[in-house]
Image (tube, grey):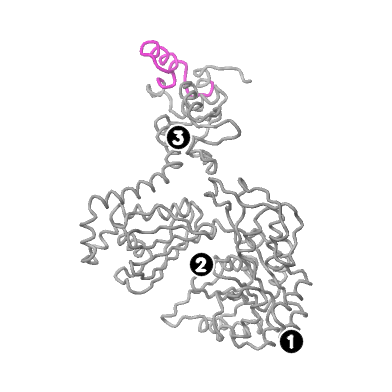
Amino acid sequence: MPSYRKLGEILINEGMLVSQQLEEAILYQAKEGGRLGEILVKLGYIKEEQIVVALSKQLAVPYLSLDSGKLKPSSDQNLKELIPYEFAVRNLVLPFSKSLNSLTVVVFDPLDLILIDNLKKLTGYEINLIVSTPADILKAIENFYGKEKAFQEAIEASYRRDSEGAEEIVIEESQLSLDKLIAKTEEAPVIKLVDLIIRQAIEEGASDIHVEPQREKISLRYRVDGVLYDIAPPSMVMQLALISRIKIMSKMNIAEKRLPQDGSFTVRIEKRLIDLRVSTIPTIYGEKIVLRILDKSRIPLELEKLGFLTQELEQIKKGLSFSYGLVFLTGPTGSGKSTTLYAALNQLCDSTKNVLTIEDPVEYKLDGINQVQVKSDIGLNFDSVLRSFLRQDPDIILVGEVRDLETAEICVRSALTGHLVLSTLHTNSAADAIVRLIDMGIPNYLIASSMRLIVAQRLVRRLCPLCKEPHELKKEELPKGVSLDASVVYKPKGCKKCNFIGFKGRMVIVEAICVNDEIRDAIYNNLNPRQMLDIARKSGTLTLLESGFKRVEEGITSVEEILSVAAY
């Protein structure tokens, strides 16, 4: 236990104060009363931060400043429920973390025993202290509570506006001029509401925002981990201005409401640049708008960090090691194909290679790669750009998606003439990609000669680590022919951290076929997809089900989750 030293002694020893100033402050204290630290600040002899640093040393209590970047409470311990916003602001106290029966809080005055006693009664926890300045504590409180509180206030404000002037606004909507509409989108409540909707979605890890006009309300939903969740919507009176504001940000034509439109814009959140792709469609109640959030900082574009099993990663790297040939990623929309493709590009790209991509749309902008955005309205489409690519001396070509025979033929021709071509197909399994290309009109022998790697993939939800519970597996719960090397697995339960869903986050499962001589012979002989997969399994390929059940054995996900996305 450190020896107790007086505050004035610490300040003098640290060179923050001289003896004469301390004596004057003590005389002032004797006449007027009050705490020595407050008096020293009032007399201008010392700054508030120096007092807190000295108190930290005097009482052996940790000190944190906002500038250090460490004055950030734990975001996953429901601290806001222990100490309400109003109490935190009134008493300048910030909940920081909790463990077992103790709660750590940040305060300005660690000697305020009444506050510490009130915190014990309020929370039911023993209290540990950290000190900081009042200004830093207040800013940290606003950062911690303020964003959520501001969102709720913006929603409530839209309803207050509705009750105060709904009739007037409804009348205006039927005869709204373009100038008036633009003016409405520039009003502070509309700007604030749109900003907060986007910020909250990003902070919650949403991949999409859906704004949908209904008969008597606006529906607002976020897609998190592949599932849509309802969010408290704004008043319907905000519908026109809200959608028009997003269209203006996306550089769309706000006067056009009869046809679908696409656009995009970029936002900066705490030094992170986040791209948003925006799409509108006309519905009977107005325009529905969807914002796709592309946050590169949340997605590691490295194959090793995407969660592949060791044997899957080896198969994929082996297929990517060829200097020419076709590499296909298959799966439904939203299965993470683009992320895996970009991670593969990152693996392959260096200054010695010329990498070209043709995409619709360009999802992630990557340094060192030449990316082209499809613009069909001016004739800039996949097949025309691919022909031009072949005159650009490429080493690696990425085609966003093979949709027709012409694009498929150019990809095959490029692969056979010394280029590595990466692309996607919409098929259920890896072997089905062969059937799809044959169905398009590509001859078997060309597919066999050019194909190097086919990867089918899905995204499955991870069980919430805080609330998952063990489950004794029964044979009838597994499909025929599938077994698990575990008698006890885990199932979802639900808690506050996972919004009572039982899942938090997602991971990839894959079926990777590295094309060898046996697979080529199977393609030449027109074997069906099941026969091709059986041959591939002899070389170490796991089916999607097998890949998924490996994660079940590890306790990462549930049997039901795997069967919902990987059974075909």
Q: Name which residue lies at 23% across and 60% down.
A: 170
Q: Which residues are magenta?
A: 13-39
Camera-nearest residue between 146 and 23: 146
Q: Is residue 231 above or below residue 509?
A: above
Distance of mark 1 from mark 3, alpha carbons?
Answer: 72 Å
Determine which of the numbered discs, if any, sits on residue 363 in the image: 2
Give the residue at mark 3.
137
Determine which of the numbered discs, if any, sits on residue 525 in the image: 1
Q: In the picture, residue 195 is in which quadrant?
A: bottom left
Q: Residues within 10 Å of mark 2 (few under 14, many from 20)?
A: many
Task: Indicate the secondary structure of the residue bearing disc 2.
Answer: loop
Q: Is residue 408 above or below residue 175?
A: below
Q: Earlier in the sequence, mark 1 or mark 3?
A: 3
Q: Earlier in the sequence, mark 2 or mark 3?
A: 3
Q: Amino acid at mark 1?
A: Asn
Distance of mark 2 from mark 1, alpha carbons?
Answer: 38 Å
The residue furthest front is 476
Left or right placement of residue 256 versus residue 291 in this view: left
Residue 235 screen position, x and y as percent: 32, 54
Left or right placement of residue 302 versus residue 140 in this view: right
Task: Indicate the secondary structure of the residue bearing disc 1.
Answer: loop
Residue 157 screen position, x and y as percent: 31, 48
Q: Is residue 142 above or below residue 458?
A: above
Q: Are marks 2 and 3 in contact (CB under 8 Å)?
A: no
Q: In the picture, residue 401 is in which quadrant?
A: bottom right
Distance of mark 2 from mark 3, alpha carbons?
Answer: 39 Å
Q: Are marks 2 and 1 in contact (CB under 8 Å)?
A: no
Asked whether 29 falls inside the magenta stretch, the response is: yes
